[in-house]
Image (cartoon, rainbow, N blue to C red):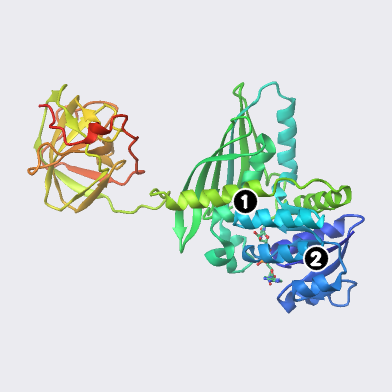
Amino acid sequence: MKLGIIGLGVIGREFVAAIDRLPGVTLTAVCDASPARLEEYAGQQIATYTSHTDLISARDCEAVIVALPNHVHGPVVSDLLGAGLHVCCEKPLTLDPAEAAELVRKAEEHGVLLRTAFHRRFNRNLLSLRDDIATRDAAVRSVKVRYHEDIREHTGGEDWYLDRDRCGGGCIVDNGPNALDMARVVVGELTLRDVTLGDVRKGMEHYAVLDLEGGAGEEVRVELDWAFTAGEAKDIEVTLTDGSVLSADMLEGFTEFKSSLAHEYVGIVDDFVSGVADDTAHPDQLALVRIVHDALERGRRKHVRLRMPSKLPVRTSVVRLLFHETVRRGMLLAHAGSACIRAGDIHELVVTREDTDVAGARIDHVAYLGFIEFLDPAMLTRGDTFWIGDRKLGVFAGYDESHLPNHLNLILSADRLVTAEDIDLRPQDVIIVREGPQREFRESADPGAWTNQAPQR
Ligand SMILES: NC(=O)c1ccc[n+]([C@@H]2O[C@H](COP(=O)([O-])OP(=O)(O)OC[C@H]3O[C@@H](n4cnc5c(N)ncnc54)[C@H](O)[C@@H]3O)[C@@H](O)[C@H]2O)c1
């Protein structure tokens, strides 16, 4: 089979080496917008082009590998398919599910194969893990994939990776497809349940945690890190229903940087070429495009960001201690989950073990810690934590307004009810409020519950 490659950067070179190692496949054309990247092919039996349209017109290959920056995948692949060429495109095929669906449609219309290059599915350690699981009596209960690297070590000096317009996003776009595909090898098609992004620099996500479900309801967690400074970690851990834990490290046995890619890219090209020869039906190109797209949409809308504090710790000082507990206090959690407090303001601090997750919840059983003066201005949010030294007093659940305009009752949710005397609190002790993961209220079953009912005293 005569193959062409468009894009001769870091990964294009992996494809060149893979083609070299496979019998029955010949590299007949290469294309790169940078003439310098074509120089080493001068004088060989390989045609060179600086434009993919010239490669198409020359008709010296029947199938083409696309190893270009992400933002040009869609238009170039579309031109190739339209010209009746089989295409194997690097991930992500595109970022827009509608555009990806159009490419799949075009491949069908022209009777050619379209594949996305997911290299980890050919990793020998992952394949042995899959085979090992198949021999077990127990089913898979959960899967955890880690894909951790320092992106600066992987870009080959190219700046498009760190440009949202050209890469499309950070680690979810770049590493997400391969990491998700690793989980797919074990549990089949995935459904996205939740995603949290973090460590966003100039709009590019450097950290992400995705929670998904496998084909048979298996729990799947994929953790992506683009700012991992301790080398690389690319592995998968599988827990079976009998409690046994199996794992595979994609890099084990490959001591040189990126050396696992050689056998994985041979796998991609071999699979692509056999797919063309056997007229294999298109595997689902779209599933991971949709998941990456949805993960970005959901994650970018969320309030929470991982590894990114949005405020400094706030100091407060105890001005009066309280030592009592009540069982029918009837506080009402205001349905706002945050409170802005000026430096110098004084508020009351109470602790409860009751359910504080419902908007407007009534809180009866409380223990009193005392009154605190805010030494710094504060924007308290549900989920913030209150600390005295290294002891956590509780998690800020909201406030009750029954003592306004005098003060707010700040309600902490805790495992144990404590008063000032239980923890040996003293006047002028410093209590620190630290940012925590923000918590949304659950919908109240009874909407009347958070109207302005007078609290029962
Ligand atoms: N680098 C990796 O480790 C790695 C791993 C897996 C997948 N990928 C994927 O492979 C693709 C390429 O990544 P890379 O790291 O090789 O990028 P790269 O920047 O190293 O190489 C891209 C090449 O494409 C050329 N180019 C850009 N626009 C062009 C155009 N319109 N026409 C022709 N040539 C053009 C550039 O001159 C460059 O040589 C990306 O989609 C990436 O997600 C990369």
Give whichever of discs 2 and 1 has the lower sequence position.
2
Q: Tag 1: Cα neighbours inside 10 Å, few (<14), some, or many (≥20)?
A: many
Tag 2 near tag 1, CB within 8 Å = no
Q: Give amino acid for label 2.
A: Ala
Whether residue 92 appears in this view of the structure is no
Task: Decide: is 277 above or below 386.
Answer: below
The residue positioned 62% from the left and 55% from the top of the image is 98
Along the line of sight, which residue is nearer the eye, 221 or 279? Answer: 279
Q: Quadrant of the N terminus?
A: bottom right
- Please state which amino acid type lies under the numbered disc 1: Val
Residue 148 in picture, x, y percent from top left: 57, 50
Asked which quadrant contains residue 140, the reply is: top right
**In the shown orientation, is residue 391 left or right of residue 6?**
left
Q: Quadrant of ligand 1?
A: bottom right
* Between 209 and 55, the one nearer to me in the picture: 55
- Tell me, for residue 289, which label it has, or none: 1
Q: Quadrant of the C terminus?
A: top left
Q: Position of residue 240 (x, y in %)?
A: 62, 26
- Residue under the image location 85 percent in, 73 percent down: 58
Rounded to the nearest angstrom, the CA distance separating label 2 from label 1 is: 24 Å
Q: Is mark 1 within 8 Å of ligand 1?
A: no
Dividing the picture into quadrants, the one containing residue 350 is: top left
Q: Position of residue 42 (x, y in %)?
A: 84, 77
| Residue sticking out furthest to the front | 109
Q: Is residue 220 in sight in this rendering? A: yes
Q: In this orientation, which residue lies closer to the viewer: 442 or 239?
A: 442
Crowdedness near tag 2: few (<14), some (14–19) or many (≥20) residues, C-alpha within 10 Å: some
Q: So how many labels did they put on this image?
A: 2
Determine whether 7 is above or below 441 in the image.
below
SS at mark 1?
A: helix
Residue underneath mark 2? 83
For this view, does 115 lie left or right of residue 368? right
